[in-house]
Image: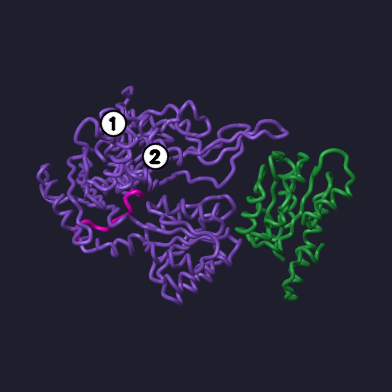
Chain colours: A green, B purple
Amino acid sequence: MNKTIVLGVIGADCHAVGNKILEMALSAAGFKVFNIGVMSSQEEFINAAIETSAGAILVSSLYGHGELDCRGFRQKCTEAGLERILLYVGGNLVVGKQDWASVEHKFKDMGFDRVYPPGTNPATAIKDLEEDLQKLEDAGKAGRECSEHVALR
Amino acid sequence: MRTLARQGENAVNTLLCVDIGSTYTKLTAFDLAKEEVIGTARAVSTVGTDVEEGYKQALNMMRAVTVLAGEFDEILACSSAAGGLKMVAIGLVPELTAQAAKQAALGAGARVLETFGFELDRYDIESILEMRPDIILLAGGTDGGNKEALIHNAGMIANYLQHIPVVVAGNKKAREEVEKVFRSKGVYYRISENVMPELNRLNVEPARESIRQLFIERIVHAKGMSGFEHAIGRVAMPTPAAVLNAVRCLAEGTEREGGLGALVALDVGGATTDVYSIGGNEVMGAGAILRGLPEPYAKRTVEGDLGMRVSAHALWAAAGNKMIREYYPGTISDYDIEERCRYLSCHTAALPADKMEKDFDEALGCAAIRLAMDRHAGSIEERYTPAGLVYIQHGKDLRRVQYLLGSGGVIVNADNPTKLLKAALAREDEDRVLKPVRPRFLIDGAYILPAIGLMAGRFPDKAVRILKKYLIECCGES
């Protein structure tokens, strides 16, 4: 299983604490974490993933502008040759008290494989990540050339 | 052990440093016991026919001016002859490993002809063949990261560019495969450490050293200089690498000899303007976030379009009439500015004949210095976020460097070198570029930077002391 992942906080968002906690939790779970830190653009996530051959990109957004910042992310990944990469997003993705199901739907619609609300335990995401990466690998072994992220969703 | 080392140093009393340039071969002789320059000489290089001829001429001139009995105890040489060390840098992502590879090559004293990213294709191969680089620096992937691009590019090189020596400084997990490919096709290569072992961590020094080794092993010979290596010993490095060495040892000092701290050096030449900076890697302060690839602690940039002669017309195009006029004390028409630049780029041996031409040269020098410094220094950007104002820093913060060192004819021969060096400083109307604010000005009047860079490897203490002794501090107002 490819346990290399890229982690960062997207947009003009400088919340650094959760980012560090996630880095620690993921590293402790045996992932090779490339943390690009706060205020990262989509391009920086993608460049990092290409250079490190990452299996997943984990995007945090805490300041409510997540929807704007994440638009077109999946398309850019596809354009950059990362058709198979897993995209996760989590945090305070939208402003105000919006219904979570609709928020989740919105981000899945944008091409994210997993979407997490505030207060998610890192262990939940880690468990999902291991499963999804394993599925990707199995699919790769089976020699299926279809784009797995579609299958996963 | 220490006394032995000292004895070894003392056994060398006279040292001759040779700088084989494209135009001139320059010699600088030192008396190491007195720590003095005992003579300098220069003669026209005759690269292509016989480099040794130029060297011998210069040596005879040297003997005429110095009262030196017998031979020099030691000779060290560097070279920028035959266009200098020409390289192409290859990486994966243009902003990441390709950029890191470029930085490594520049620091090794190379002229980087072009930087390539992603997987090389037929068109890239064709353009590399056309450019005829001396060495290829092949990077790509962090350690344990992407291997495919590096292996693909190694395969392309092995198949189509096998005559060009290669330094491999990419993903270490791909080394075995790359070596296999290169061995099978007889490529001359050296394996080095990754220029970017982890994301956004630069590691350029090992690759620089490997480039220098390849330069000694292969390039010196190819440039027709091996014939007289019996006379001068090995050509140790490209000249810009020697200058970077000198600037670095001046900044850092040694255990016994204090350095000057973070500094910037400018070398304005006929074809290029080189900028060197040591230090300035700290993030500017609380509330600032550093984005982008970190830059090398010892950084060199080369501006191929900013030069006093061959590149004068390119400099005019980059600077524009307005900027050149700003630095010219008299009045001059747009037409005259462009025509003069065009003339200078075709007449590369032209020397200013009168006050007006000298003023014009100095105005060009100011423009070259200002633009080169703009491109070398980092920048700051203000971003308003929901959490308030945040500063985003790209590149080096050179605002607090203590010294600005000038080299090259237009600065050294100026009536008022301070005026030229001031062109490098931060201006009131631009607070976004992190250029030096209030440095002290030094001039390399004796043109000894390359010689000191050569000496630094063998006699570091003496190199620092002699350089400090011969640099001229200027404080004239402009």
Tell me the residue at 39%/39% (across/down): B255
Question: Whole-percent x and y of residue B58?
Answer: 16, 49
Determine which residue is flagged by label 2: B255
* Chain ID at mark 2: B
Question: Whole-percent x and y of residue B140?
Answer: 54, 60
Q: Is residue B276 magenta?
A: no
Task: Say what secondary structure mark 2 lies in.
Answer: loop
Report the side of B366 relative to A124 (left or right).
Answer: left
Check if mark 1 and mark 2 are on a common chain: yes
* Identity, as a three-letter code, of the amino acid under mark 1: Ile
Task: Say what secondary structure mark 1 lies in.
Answer: strand
Q: Nearer the viewer, mark 1 or mark 2?
A: 1
Instruction: Name the residue nearer the viewer: B264 or B260.
Output: B264
- Residue B334, by quadrant, is top left
Residue B472's mark? 1
Q: Residues within 10 Å of mark 2 (few under 14, many from 20)?
A: few
Instruction: Name the residue nearer the viewer: B336 or B216.
Output: B336
Residues rendered magenta in the picture: B230-242
The Cα atoms of the two marked residues, 1 and 2, are separated by 24 Å
* Chain ID at mark 1: B
